[in-house]
Structure formats: C-alpha cells, structure tokens
Image (cartoon, helix red, strand yellow):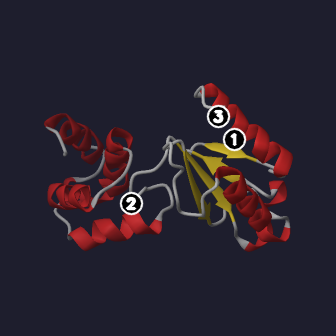
Amino acid sequence: MITEATKQRFAREVAKYPADQKQSAVMACLSIVQQEQGWVSAESEAVIAEYLGMPQIAVHEVTTFYNMYNQQPVGKYKLAVCTNLPCQLRRGQDALHHLEKKLGISMGETTADGLFTLQQCECLGACADAPVMLVNDRNMCSFMDDDKLDQLVDGLRAAEGKQ
C-alpha cells in the first residue's frame, strides 16, 4: 500500500527534475517503496507509473533491470554474490555454492527463518577483489573465501541471536 506520506516523498524526488521530465524520478520512487516495504510489488509499480505519468511496463523494466530492486520479499540480509566472468575466474561461483550449502538454500531462495536471501548478481565493479558480494545492496565484501563467508554468516546469525 502506497501511503500519502510515501507520495509526499515521491513529490520531493520529482521536484528535482524539470516538470516535463518527472519520469526521471522513477529509480528514486522505486527505492522509496523498497525502503518502506522491503520489496517492489506489481501494485507498487502501477502506483509509481500512474504518479509519474508513464506506462507501467516502463517502470517494470527498470525494476527488473537492476539487482537492487527486490521483486519479491527477501530475508533481512540479502547476500548477492558476483558471478560475472572475472569473479568466476577467482572462485565467485564457488562462493555462491558454499553459501548455498551453509545456508541450506539454493540461489534465489530465502532461509526458513527469513534471515537470509541468496542471489547472484552481475559485475559489482571490484574484479580485483574477487570473489565479491554485496550485503543488503549497501555493504561490499571482498576476497570472500570460505572462511570469510562463514564468519560473515555466523556473525550475522549471532547478531540476531540465532546461532
């Protein structure tokens, strides 16, 4: 549900652009919805499309193009492992498989306790630090060998009191 307060936040973003280019605020509006709801639903895309005066499919194209927009509910910690070629050459795919085993889920799934969602992603722009991953679309983790992956997951579980 998009509230009036959310629409006020949209308005602040739209105001940053010329009146005839308000569609330029689509990414900001999607980010606002995700911050508030944790993911972007088709219904939210429809509201954004109407608000910005653009086709709903155009909003959906943005949502599906970028990894940062969740198209379904995700766990508290979204772990996105880079599997682009440079990372794969430096064990990126192995890091993803290690996390699948450790978490007991496959790529694209969420743990039963709702704590972790595991995803693969394209280039994070840190090829020299491979394998790399992004936690909650904000925190870059580099040189993620099995030990560092275990420490990360175990540390997040401990922080949640779920060892």
Pointer 1 residue: 153
Q: Residue at x 20, y 60 (%)?
A: 20
| Closer to us: 92 or 114 | 114
Q: CA distance from mark 2 to mark 1?
A: 23 Å
Tell me the tag on residue 96.
Answer: none
Mark 2 and mark 1 in contact? Answer it, CB < 8 Å.
no
Q: What SS does tag 3 mark? A: helix
Evaluate whether residue 101 shows in this view.
yes
- Answer left or right for 123 relative to 110: right
Mark 3 and mark 1 in contact? Answer it, CB < 8 Å.
yes
Q: Residue at x 59, y 56 (%)?
A: 118
Closer mark to the observer between disc 2 and disc 1: 1
Q: Position of residue 78 (x, y in %)?
A: 55, 48
Pointer 3 residue: 156
Q: Quadrant of the C terminus?
A: top right
Quarter residue 153 falls in: top right
Q: Amino acid at mark 3?
A: Leu
Q: CA distance from mark 3 to mark 1?
A: 5 Å
Pointer 2 residue: 71
- Answer left or right for 159 relative to 31: right
Q: CA distance from mark 3 to mark 2?
A: 23 Å
Closer mark to the observer between disc 3 and disc 2: 3
Q: Position of residue 89 (x, y in %)?
A: 84, 71
Quarter residue 128 falls in: bottom right
Picture layout, residue 163 above or below residue 88: above
Mark 3 and mark 2 in contact? Answer it, CB < 8 Å.
no
Mark 3 closeness class: few <14, some 14–19, many ≥20 residues within 10 Å: some
